Image: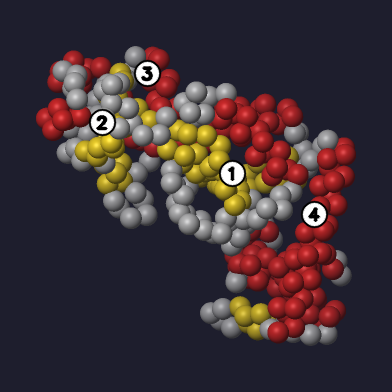
Amino acid sequence: MDILQGMAVFKRIVDASSFTKAADSLEMPRATVSTLMRSLELHLGVRLLNRTTRRVQVTDDGALYYEYCARILAEVSDAESALSNKRQRPRGTIRVDTSITFAATVLIPRMRDFHSLYPDIAVKLGLADRAIDLVQEGVDCVIRIGVLDDSNLVARPLGRVRMTTCAAPDYLDQMGEPATPDDLERYRAVNYFSSQTGRMYPFEFEVDGTVVRKQIDGGVAVNDGQVYVTSGVEGLGLIQAPRFTVAKAIEAGALREILSDFPCPSLPLSLLYPHRRLSTRVRVFSEWVYELVQRNPDLSG
C-alpha cells in the first residue's frame, strides 16, 4: 500500500474526529477512506482507531503513530515546498474560505492575475460568513473582516477596512442629508444582522475621539453583504458598509456618502491559517492577497 497516503488519511481522520468529514475534505469516497485505514492497520499489525456509530477514538498505539505521521508528513511537505521554490512553480489546490462580498469584489476580479503568476495552483473558494473549523473542514486559510475571536489560529494582518455611511440619492433628496449622527432618529436604515447570533449591528461613528453607536429603525434587515448594498441602492434606507463594497455604486452615482465629518471606525482585515508551517502554494497566495490589499486604499488604511 501507499504508506504516505495511508498516513495522510489517518491524520485527517484524527484531526476531523470523523471518517465522513475526513473523506469530504480529502475529496475521497468514504468507502475508500475506510479501506485505506483497514489496509494501514493490517500493514502495521495494530489497531489505530476505535470506531463506534457515534465517534472515532484514537487508541494508545494510534496516538503514538499520529505524532510520527504529523512529523513525517510535515517533512515531506517541506521537501516538496523546497523543490517548488527552486522551480518557482508551486502546484496543487488550496482551499480558501471568505465572504461572498470579499470574493466577488476583491479576489475574483484579479484572479486571472494570480493564475498568470501561478498557473499550477487551483484555488477552491468556500463562501460563508460563519465560523468554521479549518482542520475539520480541510481549509488552508481564511480571510476575515472584523475583530477576531481568541483561537489557536495564526493570524496575518492584511490591512484595515474603511467603512462608510451612504444612501441612495433619491432617498436623501426626499429626506435631506443629516448633519450629525443625532439627526438619524428620523431616518430609516437597512440593518445588518449576524447570521450566527441574530444580533443587529448598530451604526458606529467617531465623535470627538469617541465611538458613538446608533441603532436606527428600518423596515429591512439582511445578513448578506451584496443584498445589503443592493438594498441601499434601491432606496430602502441608510447603510453603513465597507467602502470597497460600495465604491462602484458611489462612483456611478447610485449611492451618496454622508456624514463625512463623523467617520466610521475601520475594521481589521486578516488572513488566518491553522499552523505556522505553510505550504509554498498557501504562502504565495497569502503574499498575493497582501499585495492586492495594499493597492486598495479602502482596504490598506
Whichever of labels 3 and 4 marks the residue nearer the N terminus, that label is 4
Q: SS of the residue at dot 1?
A: strand
Instruction: State yes or no: discs 4 and 1 in contact (Cβ < 8 Å).
Output: no
Would residue 88 be visible to someone looking at this image? Answer: yes
Q: SS of the residue at dot 2?
A: strand
Write the residue at 24% across / 39% down. Answer: 213
Q: CA distance from mark 2 to mark 4?
A: 51 Å
- Judge left or right: residue 74 versus residue 249: right
Vertical comparison of 77 with 284: above or below:
below
Q: Would you name the residue on which mark 2 appears?
A: 207
The image shows residue 236 at horizontal and vertical percentages of 23, 30
Whichever of labels 1 and 2 marks the residue nearer the N terminus, that label is 1
Q: Would you name the residue on which mark 3 appears?
A: 250
- Tag 4: amino acid: Ser
Whichever of labels 1 and 3 marks the residue nearer the N terminus, that label is 1
- Judge left or right: residue 12 versus residue 83: left
Whichever of labels 4 and 1 marks the residue nearer the N terminus, that label is 4
Q: Badge 4: few (under 14), some or many (20 or more) residues near its Cα, within 10 Å? A: some
Q: Would you name the residue on which mark 4 appears?
A: 77
